[in-house]
Amino acid sequence: MKLTRRPRRLRGSPAIRRMVRETVLNVDDLIYPIFVRFGSHIREEIPSMPGIYRFTLDELEPEIREVQELGIPAIILFGIPEYKDEKATSAFEENGIVQEAVRLVKKLAPDLFVITDVCMCQFTTFGHCGIVKDGKVLNDESLEILAKIAVSHVKAGADMVAPSAMMDGQVRAIREALDAEGFTDIPIMGYSAKYASAFYGPFRDAAESAPKFGDRSTYQMDPPNWREAMREIELDIEEGADIVMVKPALPYLDIIARARERFDYPIAAYNVSGEYSLVKAAAMQGWIDEKRVTLELLTSIKRAGADLILTYFAKDVARWIG
């Protein structure tokens, strides 16, 4: 019997595979996370994240120049402050570490799009994402501080803010605060479906943000739930988010896909530290082809429906795909 359907006809050469490729990963999809810390003359590699560093401001310029040269359009800044207290005061100071980093980056690279993470965990003595009282993370009391942090970042020159605390109503509180200050054109990228994941471990080392007691499961999402994720995303959109995010990315590709089907909004996905470090560790052992595995993983995130990918692989990918 003669075959009339032969899908292999479109796989016969690199040229034809490129021509019919359905999903294309490119540099414009990427957002590169950068860690900045208080101090001077420090460029320290994070042991659990090979190739990723904490920078003091006087060491940051070469990193920003490299990001520019590679054509990566955006970065997201995470700060490690000089001091911590119970109210995250250092997070919204005019001359705080993130605020100063924003000013420096915009001076060095005015066209680089600067996003800031808006949270409290790096800036509080207890390492949680909101105000704590009697061992409980308080939601509504945290909103005012998150709004103050966001406004301080934008006053310093941030192009977009990204609230990650998973406090109910955080997007609305920040939107109202920004609008009241005249920053109506500043977009918000909500960490809308942020799960209480085991994949965040290396990041907490990098940002010195591990909780001092308990965990974050009372405010970050329970991993088995997908319908709840749709509600969280919908709420963020209603509250004024311009971009919504799923975090982590790889264990939650189904969430990205469901969100893509349901919401006509830009979707970001965070390829988090644990996902990065697993690949790096296996590659260092010679067990995998790092380039092929990384490109396959990031393509899967985009194929699932993400428009933007926050990833520590951004510089590597930019070099590989040009």
Image (cartoon, rainbow, N blue to C red):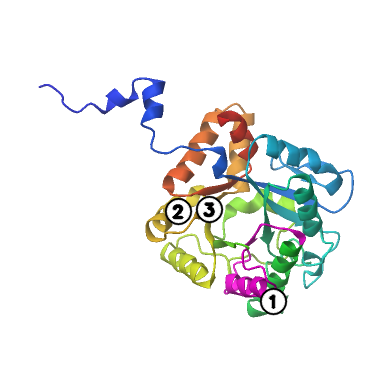
Mark number, residue 191:
none
Cβ–Cβ below 8 Å for labels 1 and 2? no
Location of mark 2 (residue)? 256
Task: Give the mark nearer the N terminus: 3 vs 1.
Answer: 1
Farthest residue, direction left? 1
Would you say 301 lies left or right of 45 here?
left
Q: CA distance from mark 1 to mark 2?
A: 30 Å
According to the picture, the residue beneath numbered tag 1 turns out to be 144
Q: Please give the name of the residue rendered at 72% of the width and 36% of the height, measured from the top-left corner.
A: 66
Can residue 105 be seen in this snapshot? yes
Instruction: Please state the horizontal and vertical placement of residue 290, each as a whole percent of the image.
Output: 57, 30
Numbered tag placed on residue 268 in the rendering: 3
The boundaries of the magenta stretch are: 156-185
Query: In the rendering, at what x and y percent does residue 96 appear?
Result: 82, 61
Q: CA distance from mark 3 to mark 1?
A: 25 Å
As helix, strand or loop, the secondary structure at mark 2 comes to helix
Give the amino acid type for the residue marked by disc 2 in the picture: Ile
Q: Amino acid at mark 1?
A: Glu
Q: Is residue 15 above or below residue 45?
A: above
* Amino acid marked by disc 3: Ala
Residue 76 picture location, percent across and down: 67, 52
SS for tag 3? Answer: strand
* Residue found at x 54% / y 35%: 294
Residue at position x 53%, y 57% in the image = 245
Dot 2 or dot 3, earlier in sequence = 2
Above or below 232: residue 264? above
Tell me the quarter of the image containing the C terminus.
Answer: top right
